[in-house]
């Protein structure tokens, strides 16, 4: 799959200091996602989500209990708006009940919670500040990543009944919005710019309806290196 490699490359080119902040965040996201996986008993899953909602509040109050939340706070500090985790938990709740968006705006609202909130937290953690422009950057990037993720599962519940061309156009618009981040805030966002560049390449392949599902790993490595270099030269 393209997504794990894109994430690995974005973390690799972000640098050691950025990885120290991002790895606990992505691990925490995986912990939440696992709660809503198929086959999990619903009563248990709902109880776990309720606990995590309390943990999101504790993290926002800088008093987390879970090891991953504590590691995130230690690495990223008190700048990120940790209350955004409530959005991620809401997305997990939707997944648990099998929610299927009936319109493109419904899908966009869902991926803003599932992917956008995560990327907004990532941008703020990397910058060491909570800024509306950083949140908008993360929401735009996450919106594109979420739509592409939905499109990556043909016949899947998120995008099956929605117009593919419109979804591709919305993903393209979301990626374009990531360029609006003020120059003064770009230096710390190598991770986001690498993800955006690789996502743009994946989107172009979908738009061209090429036979290959993903490019050779060396092609992705080259694109990631160029995106990271551009970000650092900003």
Image: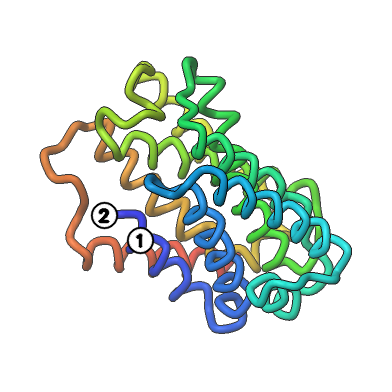
Horizontally, residue 8 falls left or right of residue 139, namely: left
Q: Quadrant of residue 74?
A: bottom right
Q: Is residue 187 left or right of residue 105?
A: right
Crowd class of label 2 (few under 14; some 14 to 19; many from 20; radius 10 Å): few
Q: Quadrant of the C terminus?
A: bottom right
Image quarter of residue 29: bottom right
Q: Is residue 96 visible?
A: yes
* Marks 1,2: beta carbons within 8 A: yes
Find the distance from the CA under tag 1 to the CA under tag 2: 6 Å
Q: Secondary structure at mark 1?
A: helix
Q: Which mark is residue 4?
A: 1
Q: Is residue 148 above or below residue 126?
A: above
Front-most of residues 17 and 86: 86
Provide the secondary structure element on which disc 2 rests: loop
Quarter of the image with the N terminus in it: bottom left
Image coordinates for residue 231, horizontal then vertical, percent = 54, 64
Q: Can you see residue 177?
A: no
Write down the residue under mark 2.
1
Q: In terms of depth relative to the viewer, which is nearer, 72 or 58?
A: 58
Outermost residue on the right side: it is: 61
Residue located at (63% from left, 73% from top): 68
């Amino acid at each position: 799959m393209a997504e794990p490699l894109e994430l690995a490359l974005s973390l690799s080119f972000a640098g050691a200091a950025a990885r120290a902040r991002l790895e606990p965040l992505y691990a925490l996201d995986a912990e939440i996602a696992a709660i809503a996986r198929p086959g999990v008993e619903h009563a248990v899953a709902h109880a776990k989500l309720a606990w995590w909602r309390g943990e999101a509040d504790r993290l926002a109050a800088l008093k987390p209990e879970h090891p991953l939340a504590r590691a995130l706070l230690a690495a990223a500090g008190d700048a990120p708006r940790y209350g955004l985790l409530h959005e991620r938990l809401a997305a997990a709740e939707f997944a648990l009940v099998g929610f299927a968006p009936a319109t493109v705006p419904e899908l966009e609202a869902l991926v803003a919670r599932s992917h956008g909130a995560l990327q907004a937290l990532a941008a703020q953690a990397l910058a060491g500040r909570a800024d509306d422009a950083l949140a908008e950057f993360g929401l735009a990037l996450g919106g594109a990543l979420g739509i592409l993720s939905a499109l990556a599962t043909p016949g899947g519940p998120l995008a099956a009944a929605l117009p593919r061309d419109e979804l591709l156009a919305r993903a393209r618009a979301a990626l374009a919005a990531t360029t609006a981040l003020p120059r003064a805030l770009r230096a710390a966002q190598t991770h986001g710019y690498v993800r955006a560049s690789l996502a743009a390449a994946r989107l172009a392949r979908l738009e061209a309806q090429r036979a290959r599902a993903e490019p050779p790993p060396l092609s992705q490595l080259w694109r990631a290196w160029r995106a990271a270099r551009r970000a650092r030269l900003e």
